[in-house]
Image (tube, rainbow, N blue to C red):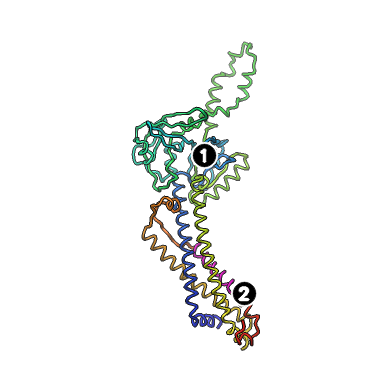
Amino acid sequence: MLFYLAFRNIISRKSSLVIVSFIALTVMLFSFVNAVFDSTENGVQETFCSSFTGDLIIRPESDVPLSLFGDETPVTGMLTKIKNIIPFNEVYETVKNNPYINKTVPQVSCTAALENGKIRIPACLFGVKCSEYLYVMDSIEITEGTVFDSVDGGCLLQKDTAEKLKVSPGSTIQAVVADGISFRIRSLTVTGIYEYTHVHSSLEKIVIADFNVVRELSGQNSSGMQNYEFSHDIESILSSDLDDENFFFSDEMDASELFVEETENSFSENPIWNFIVCRTEKTSDAKKAASVLNSQFKKSGWPAEAVLWRQAAGSSALYIYWLRVIFNGGIFVILIAGFIVINNTLVIHIFDRTKEIGTLRAIGASSLFVSAECFLENLILSMTAAVFGILFSFILCSAVSYGKLTFSNSFLIQLFGSEPLMLKVTPVNAASVVVLCFVLAVFAWIIPVKSALSVEPVKAIQGAK
């Protein structure tokens, strides 16, 4: 009976079609915008994660914003040395034992200028073990040449970078790093040319290079001797009496052999790496992995931290993120204005029925019955509009996806990526719209019904407001 009355009242009023149409239009816009941002966010994340950031990275604790490119502090960031992960072996073992992580590769980074004759371009060198890095970063495709695992001082250049430097596989270029008033210069042999499957401007400055060369360019002692601590036996030798006749001929130890053994151990126990880039089995596992690792690092007292791909990418990703937030904020303001209009429409819809409500009460209808009937009307209007809005949004998203819309403007590529837009209305997106419409129906029902019920039935029948 109650549902029948509510449905009959909706059908009998021409304004119901206008209300449903307006709400459906707003819902369609809301769902479509959410689908666009979901798609582009996933696209940018996939581009970055499969190209250079991984799903998360391990980095040394730092007081400055630190990414895979180095210190992100404006102006002075170029002058800051990147700290190393300490203790690397223990941290690396902990990372590899994490159940969420299935791929890892250590990395050392350095900003340099690449030179070929009179041509000079800025670049960020990623010092890695080439085969391991390409295994983790599956978005990289070598188009010419080969990897540099068997070539000391080798590097891979992007196609655009190689064209700018006018080099090809087999060419030699110079990498130059300024250190105060002096310079460090190392030669790099171009062993291959590569391209990224997903194109993005943030990838243009990356050069994949031999980690030993990058260590030398960044001024780090690859032997790890800066952290070498003498063992008790070595200290006892140095403190012994040099006049002791047994000092040089003791059978208990050979000082040179002991020193070589301890030094070789220090090479393996104190490797120099700035980052550990990690991939997870599922993208959604990255947050769980980072949380577990950070707890383990804190418990062990290690100055390292796990951060997600956005922090790993640095200012470029954050720039895109905030642009998207601002753009989304503008859309949200427009939608809020639309929902306010919808709310007022539903409120007026009930206020206009004050005389009808008074008649119902005069013939014996209770306040609860009247309230429930008005609520059902609002709910039916809102839910019907939500269903049509989601349906129209689905059709619009399918049309855009079928049309394979792409962008050529550099600003739009920064926001939405270079790949064709593939949009879909996700279950979460649809559910959020339904919940929003339900809340809208409730808010548009409470105040006007309360006001209408406060009017005496006789006055209501006479048209009191």
Q: Are marks 2 and 1 in contact (CB under 8 Å)?
A: no
Q: Is residue 228 visible?
A: yes
Q: Residue at x 48, y 49 (%)?
A: 281
Picture quarter containing residue 404? bottom left
Viewer-proximal residue, 71 or 76?
76
Query: Residue 59 location in percent, x, y?
Result: 54, 41
Amino acid at the residue labelled 2: Ile
Closer to the camera, 297 or 364? Answer: 364
Q: Where does the N terminus fall, quadrant-wise? A: bottom right
Q: Label for residue 70?
A: 1
Q: Quadrant of the C terminus?
A: bottom right
| Front residue of 28 and 263 | 28
> Along the horizontal axis of the image, is 143 left or right of 439?
left
Left or right: where 464 falls relative to 95: right
Q: Secondary structure at mark 1?
A: strand
Residue of label 2: 447
Disc 2 residue crowd, few under 14, some 14–19, many 20+, Cα 10 Å = few
How far from the left and from the top, in percent, is residue 237?
62, 19
Element at badge 2?
Answer: helix
The x, y position of residue 45, in whole percent, is 47, 50
- Look at 62% across and 40% down and name the residue there: 300
Confirm whether residue 150 shows in the render: no
Locate residue 326 relative to residue 143 in the image: left or right.
right
441 in magenta:
yes
Q: Residue at horizontal 59%, vertical 18%?
A: 252
The picture places residue 185, in percent across and down from the top left corner, at 45, 29
Q: Amino acid at mark 1?
A: Gly
Q: In the image, which residues are magenta?
A: 428-444
Kindly report the secondary structure that dominates the magenta region of the rendered protein. helix
Say which mark, if any, is on residue 125: none
430 in the magenta segment: yes
- First in sequence, mark 2 or 1: give its number: 1
